[in-house]
Image (cartoon, rainbow, N blue to C red):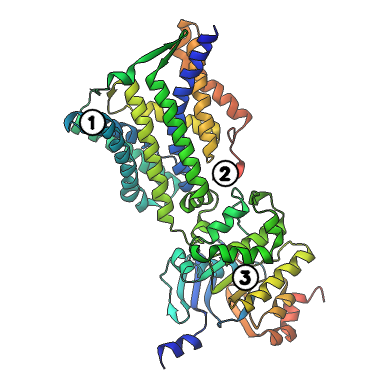
Amino acid sequence: MSELVAQQVLNALALGGVYALLGLGLAMVFSVLGMINFAHGELMTFTGYALIFLSATLGWPFFLAVFAAFAVAAASAALIERVAFRPVRGASLTTMLLTTFAISSILHVVFQNFISPRPIAVAIPDWLTSTAQFSGLRIGMLQCISLGVTVVALIGLTVFLRFSITGLAMRAAAQDFSITRLMGIPANRVIVTAFAISGLLAGLSGFLWVAQRGSVDPLMGFVPVLKAFIAVVLGGLGSLPGAVLGGFLLGFLEVLLRAMLPSELLPFRDAISLSIIITILVLRPNGLLGRAEAVR
Amino acid sequence: MSASEKHTTDPALELRGVTISYGAIRAARSVDLTVGAGEIVTLIGPNGAGKSSTLMGTVGLAPRGGAVLMYGEDVSNASTEQLVRKGLTLSPEGRRIFGNLSVAENLRLGGATARKTAGETEERLLDAFPKLRARYGQQAGTLSGGEQQMLAIARALMSNPSIVLLDEPSLGLAPKIVDTIFETIEQLRTWKISVLLVEQDIERALEVSDRGYVMSHGEIQMTGTSNELLTNANLKEMFFGENA
Ligand SMILES: Nc1ncnc2c1ncn2[C@@H]1O[C@H](COP(=O)(O)OP(=O)(O)O)[C@@H](O)[C@H]1O
Ligand SMILES: [Mg+2]
């Protein structure tokens, strides 16, 4: 019994970690622009395609291809900011949101027409999908990597946000963008950095997602990012620790429901977890860690 | 006139025909104003006169028309970031410190453009505001109003500015803390920093300053030396009428 619990905790941590990374990516951009980037999921998908292109088509060693795909994700996010968001900066929130939807749809079409409308398999090295048996506990290599990547990313991000000037500026900008500029810090630097980090986080979670499923398809990013969005709202829009907390909570909730629900109710899993989250939000409208003033 | 001569005679800050508009709302209309090098100049006027808008527009944080010059150089098209790097800064109305950051982090951001001298400047400021030293690692949002105001001023001074705009630094503070704030403003003179001060405490502001401007309905109505303004009967009528 205790092995089963430990097993499920591990599953929940691994799944929650992916939501946390995705949620952090959304929260990062939200905290400086006050906007949810709904094209975030396409960055995940794009990471998957970049991985296939680099490892299968160009024949790069798998790990080199993975790291290059991360870089591609970060750079694409910065590029999207430059070509799509900067021109509408200062426009109404609705305009910016429509822009994120437009980018998302354009990328879908590009993926479908120029890559493939069907899933493409990714050759994942065997050892990555291997599992080890520890006294009844089945530990997947990928679960460990998911957890490891999440922990390293969270520590790295914390160090960056606490100790670098740009990191401090990003936290300051989340509270008061104008006055952050008054510190002599260019608005563009703060925003591009937020997008690049957000892209990197989408890349990390994209890789973990693809490694889990073994394939990439044009709409792959939609569901996880929707869930990450829910996680961010649950944690408190605008709060970075909130995004992490919300991600892990959602992971635990999903794994718990999967383990506990009778099989005839399993199809309603998402509906049930959403209902629970809505109940929490009714009680705490600003999310778990959100403060009223953190939401603009 | 040689370049260096020009530099010494030009005012530190000059506004020429500055207009601030928020859509249809004109908050300031063709404001002409100068702050000489090393001078303390006060800008006074009733609520809604357009003082804060003028200061925010000067640093590029409100929509501005007209020209801004620093030491004779036209900086009208410079961004806020560039103006700060050139030595202009503002301690904004309502303090607007970063409440989710620590006192130390607020100061570090303030010194982001002057990293070489930041350590030294910070020491000097922490000597001037010992309360901030005591609260150094604390979240700025948990500070008292007076401490937050000191932090706002210290944060602005961390950039090693040559010109500081101060927007209502004494607003809502206890008399003892107001004393500290005005002592600091006087000290800025010895640090060779030119000051444009917006204050509700008119008498006190004029006592520490060299000259003053009176603004109402978005326009400069009157200007003179601080002594002239202090003894001006019209001004007394305008501001102290009820209380005096
Ligand atoms: N961000 C803004 N948007 C629209 N109107 C503004 C804004 N800031 C100030 N105003 C208006 O501009 C006028 C001048 O305000 P302000 O500059 O704050 O005056 P003061 O600092 O002298 O009290 C007021 O009528 C105010 O309502
Ligand atoms: Mg004001």
Residue found at x 36% / y 48%: A85
**Up/down of B53 relative to A259, above or below:** below
In which of the image's four quarters is ligand 1 placed?
bottom right
Place residue A51 in its image quadrant: top left
Mark seen at residue B49: 3
Q: Earlier in the sequence, mark 1 or mark 2?
A: 1
Mark 1: few/some/many CA within 10 Å (<14, 14-19, 20+): few
The three-letter amino acid code for the residue at tag 2 is Ala
Is disc 3's CB within 8 Å of ligand 1? yes
Measured as percent of width and height from the top left, residue B143 is found at 69, 52
Measured as percent of width and height from the top left, residue A49 is found at 25, 31
Q: Are marks 1 and 3 in contact (CB under 8 Å)?
A: no
As drawn, the residue found furthest toward the front would be A134
- Choose mark 1 or mark 3, whichever is in front: 1
| Mark-to-mark CA distance, 1 and 2 | 44 Å
Residue found at x 45% / y 23%: A14
Mark seen at residue A5: none
Q: Secondary structure at mark 3?
A: loop
